[in-house]
Image (cartoon, grey):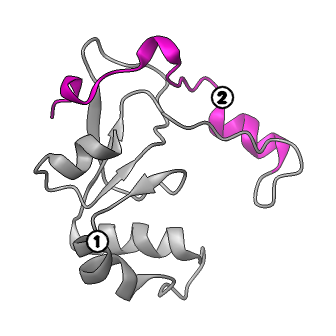
Amino acid sequence: MAMWFLRTPTPAITLSLYSPSKAVAENEIVRYRKDFGAWGWCCTRAVWLRLLAPYWNYKRDLPIGWDWSISKLMADKGLRAIEPALSRVRNIGREKGTYQTPEGYDRDFAGQTWAGVEHMQGIEDFRL
């Protein structure tokens, strides 16, 4: 998926491998998102140098952190990312998570779906 992102012209600045999907439309493979998906992501070197690196950890009001800083940058500048319709990563930090409680995990991730082996696709299968 990362190779597809690097080879495909798109206005998206990052590819997020996480998607909070609870249902997926038939034939939906990728879609745009307005925020930064911190759980598995990539960008081009040019995007990193021109956009992300200068804003890394720049946000000073709560919530703070590099991920919140990039989400704020995207909102302020109207930037987008691409995510798979079915998440390619899964948060497994329910127990003893640094920034998550079991109750918060159950609330935030209840009902989400993610891709399994049966959803693997070749690079030629991804289309915007």
Q: Secondary structure at mark 1?
A: helix
Which residue bears the numbered disc 1? 45
Q: Quadrant of the N terminus?
A: top left
- Name the image quarter holding residue 3: top left
Residue at point 10% right, 51% down? 9
Image coordinates for residue 30, horizontal then vertical, percent: 28, 33
Q: Residue at x 14, y 56 (%)?
A: 11
Quarter of the rendering containing residue 86: top left
Which residue is at the front of the view, 10 or 63?
A: 10
Image coords of residue 25 (percent x, y) = 31, 16
Q: Are marks 2 and 1 in contact (CB under 8 Å)?
A: no
Q: Amino acid at mark 1?
A: Arg
Kind of residue sitting beneath label 2:
Ala
Residues under labels 2 and 1: Cα distance?
Answer: 35 Å
Q: Of 119 and 91, which appears nearest the observer?
A: 119
Q: Which residue is mark 2?
A: 110
Q: Estimate how packed mark 2 is, as few (under 14), some (14 to 19) or many (20 or more) residues with alpha carbons within 10 Å.
A: few
In the picture as drawn, the residue positioned furthest to the right comes out as 96
**Which residues make up the magenta segment?**
101-128
Report x, y in % for residue 98: 81, 60
Quadrant in the picture for the C terminus: top left
Q: Is residue 110 magenta?
A: yes
In the figure, is residue 115 to the left or right of 43? Answer: right
